Image (cartoon, grey):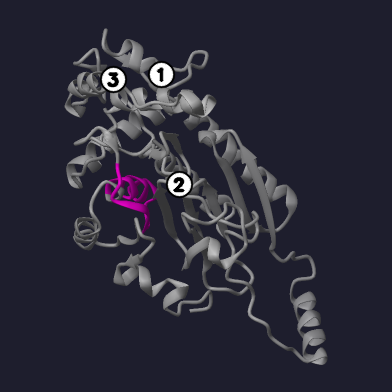
Amino acid sequence: MYSMGEIPGDPERFVETAGREAFLIKKTVFLFAILFCLLLCPFGRAEEKYSKNYFGAFDTVVQLIGYTDGQETFDRAADALMARLLEYHEAFDGYHSYPEVHNVWYLNRYAGQGPVEVPDCLFDLLSWCKEVSAQVPSKVNIAMGSVLSLWHEERERGLEDPSSAKLPDRAALEEAARHTDFDDVILDPENRTVFFADPELKLDLGAVAKGWAADQAQKDLMETMPSFLVSLGGNVYAGDAPADGRKHWGVSIQNPEGTVLSALQTDYLDVLYVDHMSVVTSGDYQRFYTVDGENYCHIIDPDTLMPAQNMRAVTVLCESSGLADYLSTALFLLPIDEGTALVESLPGVEALFCAMDGTVTMTEGMAAVARSHGATSGD
């Protein structure tokens, strides 16, 4: 269950909405400045902005904007980013197999029979999930694959043939829910293996995979092209500030009632001005299907085994994209008052909530970087 909040606008506009402040420079001053730079750096090259879009990893559009000294440098960084993300996509995929890859699909079929050696990235992500679930208890449970697969199958059938769309069988959901104990996922750090003590257990990494992947990818980008903004669907990470004089990147938060890839102000809830931060959105408006006139989203409450209906969307701001991804789902599964209390208990974490009626509330730290509360790209 991926967190699927999208950022409206075209690839340049929707992740970079701050715009350059207009300024006037006298012609003579401008010419002297250019001459001064040329004299000091006769062979230097100013950093310019480049952008590139890919599709394939995590079944979403991956978008990268960066400032660097040339197209070749940017392309190398962008291609390396996509290669890394495709590696993670294959390892974390629970619905498809890949040659010689012991991924989540493979684990769900064979880890109940005995320990399975897995790629380092998959073992590291599962270990991280163990740590974060212990440190920040929530309803998020990556061992709910048996339940989520039932919803996934009905959603796929319902989208293919809306006239026959139906909910999963309740008895089947309840039986599947008996096999969702994350403690039954046994990790062996020495041999890098995974074993399911419950053979009926299945993993689903949708609530954490993109965020964890973004965290790893941004480390590479910081070394090769530090002034960048990367988006994996609803997961955005901002590196160094844009190399055009602004202090922050502008990241738009889509209005659940708005249109994807639109530049209209009514199609997004707010703009956040950030750098060295991750912005992750979970919502009910991207991945859903309709049964008897009612929409059912992909984020399932483990208590009810039904899609959560506490809010339309939640956006989390913090340094770690993995934690932001985890928390955006966790908060989506809680009433807003409980979600706010959880956020306020976590240092360095802020959140924006969009209620079922469209009302937007946010924590104090989120308001400090939001355009609706006066923040700008130059603050």
> Which of disc 1 and disc 3 is earlier in sequence?
1
- Looking at the image, is mark 3 or mark 1 nearer the viewer? 1
Q: Residues within 10 Å of mark 1 (few under 14, many from 20)?
A: many
2 in magenta? no
Q: Residues in magenta?
A: 308-330
Q: Quadrant of residue 110?
A: top left
Q: Give the residue at mark 2.
A: 285
Q: Which mark is residue 224?
A: none
Q: Give the residue at mark 3.
A: 194
Secondary structure under tag 3 reads: strand
Identify the residue at image location x=20%, y=18%.
175
Q: Is residue 205 above or below residue 173?
A: below
Please report contact status of discs 1 and 2: CB closer than 8 Å, yes or no: no
- Looking at the image, is mark 1 or mark 2 nearer the viewer? 2
- Looking at the image, is mark 2 or mark 3 nearer the viewer? 2
312 in magenta? yes
Identify the residue at image location x=54%, y=65%.
266
- Residue 320 placed where, x, y %? 37, 52
- Residue 240 placed where, x, y %? 52, 63
